[in-house]
Amino acid sequence: MGVLDTIALLLTLAALFSYLNERFLHLPTTIGIMLISLVLSFSMLVVGKLGWPVLQVEARHFLEGVDFHQALMQGMLSFLLFAGALHINLNDLAKQKTIVIILATIGVLVSTLIVGSLSYWLLNALGLKISFLYCLLFGALISPTDPIAVLAILKNVGVKKSLQVTVAGESLFNDGVGVVVFLVLLKLASGGAVTTPGGVGLLLLQEIAGGVVFGLLTGLAVYWLLKTVNQYQVEVLLTLALVMGGYALATFLHVSAPIAIVVAGLVIGNHGRVFAMSDETRKHLDQFWELVDEVLNAVLFLLIGIEILVLSLREEYLLAALGIIPMVLLARYVSVSLPMLIMEKFRRSSPNVVEVLTWGGLRGGISVALALSLPGGPERDVILAVTYAVVISSILIQGLTIKQVVAGK
């Protein structure tokens, strides 16, 4: 199946499932699409077990032709991050900058260590022999809260503004940090050159600080270009060039492309919106990026739902997933509560903010994409299956109950 046919099929299914959700389920669009695609996938598996495997075989063949990791990490992610950052007020974010930075860095590292240690103990106790380094890899890919999943849910939840900015800001930055930590650990696991603490620290600094600087420079460059024209078609095109070209160039320069795009999006969404755009341009720019965000989110959650068809669903993997799901939540709680406890000495936070941040820390497509990027082998099969289970439970259980958690505070 060609690229155009693949895109056509994904968009058609996303549109159909979106309609079914809006017509009958009335769930948040992304969750509804994923739930319907999950039901379809399980139906294919059941029908295959009953002796009619044709649909399952065809679906698996289709999915094997879709590189989920490539599609998200080198395609959709840049658009989704930019669209999310575009609507975050920089002044509001600045007020929460300390806690956002701590949660996005130290929080990710603490969670990675906790998840890695607990999963190493559990997986080996279940007879699934896996090295501690690979367990840390799993911790790194599952610890960041996914901005795509989080921002999609926050749109439909009445969260206090300061808390919403904290959750959104953390989720936009910690995925970039998580990706960097994952890549460092992957180099170590594959016998790469980064083997000393100094080398690890240098790589982290290059990726994270480099991403911030690169995003700031490219964002300011496009901001200057936006100031010199007053035609919304050209200005929308400039933002497209910033997202696609900026992401590609950041990857080439070995700095964090996700962080770079978030920073560039904050620059354009604040200084660019106020000082470089007319009212008409702002209107068209917002409408364009909101549409891009909605369409790509629909396709992404559709892919997450049908990806189960290519997973290895062994019984021990399912048992491991049942144990690891609460472990990931525990790690999230600890990694949030420790920074908040420290910050409490300097400023008062919203009541029960730890519980809201913990339950609102959804996992999504980035975790699945990183798991799919692991080299083939038994470790990859285990990590992929467990990652998928954590992501699905996170989106369905936490995503559907976050309103109740917020309302109860």
Image (cartoon, rainbow, N blue to C red):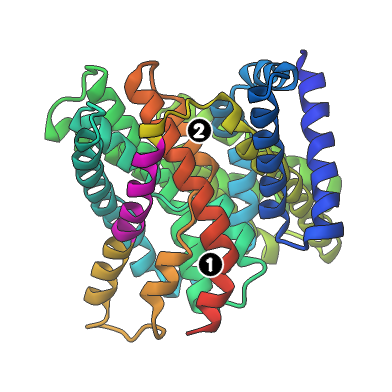
Rendering coords of residue 246 (x, y %):
57, 35
Badge number at residue 369: 2
Q: Is residue 278 magenta?
A: no
Q: Secondary structure at mark 1?
A: helix
Q: Secondary structure at mark 2?
A: helix
Residue found at x 66% / y 66%:
155
Nearest to the observer: residue 126 or residue 21: 126
Q: Which residues are magenta?
A: 318-332
Q: Quadrant of the N terminus?
A: top right
Looking at the image, can residue 207 be seen?
no
Rendering coords of residue 136 (x, y %):
25, 37
Q: Is residue 252 left or right of residue 281?
A: left
The alpha-carbon separation of the residues under discs 2 and 1 comes to: 29 Å
Q: Is residue 297 left or right of residue 146?
A: right
Report which residue position mark 1 lands on: 90
Is disc 2 in contact with disc 1, using a CB cutoff of under 8 Å?
no
Badge 2 or badge 1: first in the primary sequence: 1
Picture mark count: 2
Residue found at x 61% / y 55%:
84
Q: Quadrant of residue 376?
A: top left
Rendering coords of residue 277 (x, y %):
76, 60
Residue found at x 37% / y 29%:
382
